[in-house]
Image (cartoon, helix red, strand yellow):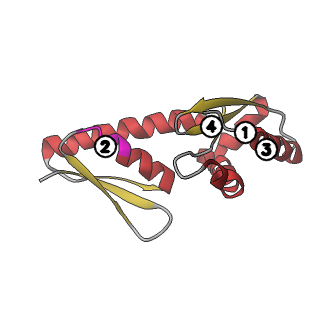
Amino acid sequence: MSENVTPIVDFLNTFNEALGITSSIDVEHADEGPRLNMTGEDAELLARHRGEPLKALQYVVDMAFGRELGEEKRIFVDALGYRKGKDIELRQMAKYLAGKAKDTGMEQQLGPLNPYERRLVHMAAAEVPGVKTESIGDTFTKTVTISARK
C-alpha cells in the first residue's frame, strides 16, 4: 500500500524554503509508514544538537499529518539518515541490555526516552526471550526498565 505523501513533501519543502535550507527529500515506503529523508548539505542543520530540531519537526509533521495514515502507520522525518542510524543504535542497545538483564538477573534501565524511542526499546527487547520491559515516569520522556522474567 502506497500512501500519498505529496502534501507532507510539499510541507517539508515549504519549511526548508522558510529556513533557507536547500535539500532534496527522498521517500521510502516501509511497512510501518513512509520515511522522508532530507538530504543535501543544509540538511545537517536538522541533525545538530542531538537531533532536537529534527524531533521538533517530527512533532509538527505528526500533528499536521499523522492522523491521515491511520492507527498502524507512522510518518518518519529524517535528515541525512540521522534518525535511522539512531534507531538502529537504540535497538542494538535494547537487545544488549535485555541479554544482560537475562544473564545477570539485574534490572537494566534505558532513558529518558520519548514515546517513539520507548516503543523501539520495547519491541527490540521483546525479541529476547525471558525478559520484560516497563516504562517508568509520569512525563513525556520516561525510562524503560528491562528485567528478567520471573
Q: Position of residue 45 (x, y in %)?
A: 73, 41
Q: Which residue is mark 4?
A: 34
Q: Which residue is mark 3?
A: 7
Sequence order check, earlier mark of 1 and 2: 1
Q: Nearer the viewer, residue 93 or 84?
A: 84
Q: What kind of residue is marked 2?
A: Ala
Q: What kind of residue is marked 3?
A: Pro
Q: Which residue is mark 2?
A: 125
Between the C-alphas of marks 3 and 1, the distance is: 6 Å
Considering the numbered disc 4 on the image, is that residue within a helix, a strand or a loop?
strand
Badge 4, how many Cα within 10 Å: few under 14, some, many 20+? many
- From the viewer's perspective, tell me whether residue 99 is left or right of residue 59: left
Q: Which residue is mark 1?
A: 5
Against 53, residue 38 (above or below) is: above
- Answer yes or no: do the residues labelled 3 and 1 have beta carbons within 8 Å? yes
Between the C-alphas of marks 1 and 2, the distance is: 31 Å
- From the viewer's perspective, tell me whether residue 137 is left or right of residue 126: right
Sequence order check, earlier mark of 1 and 4: 1
Labels in figure, total: 4
Furthest residue to the left?
A: 150
Furthest residue to the front?
A: 1
Is-magenta flag for residue 62?
Answer: no
Sequence order check, earlier mark of 3 and 2: 3
Considering the numbered disc 2 on the image, is that residue within a helix, a strand or a loop?
helix
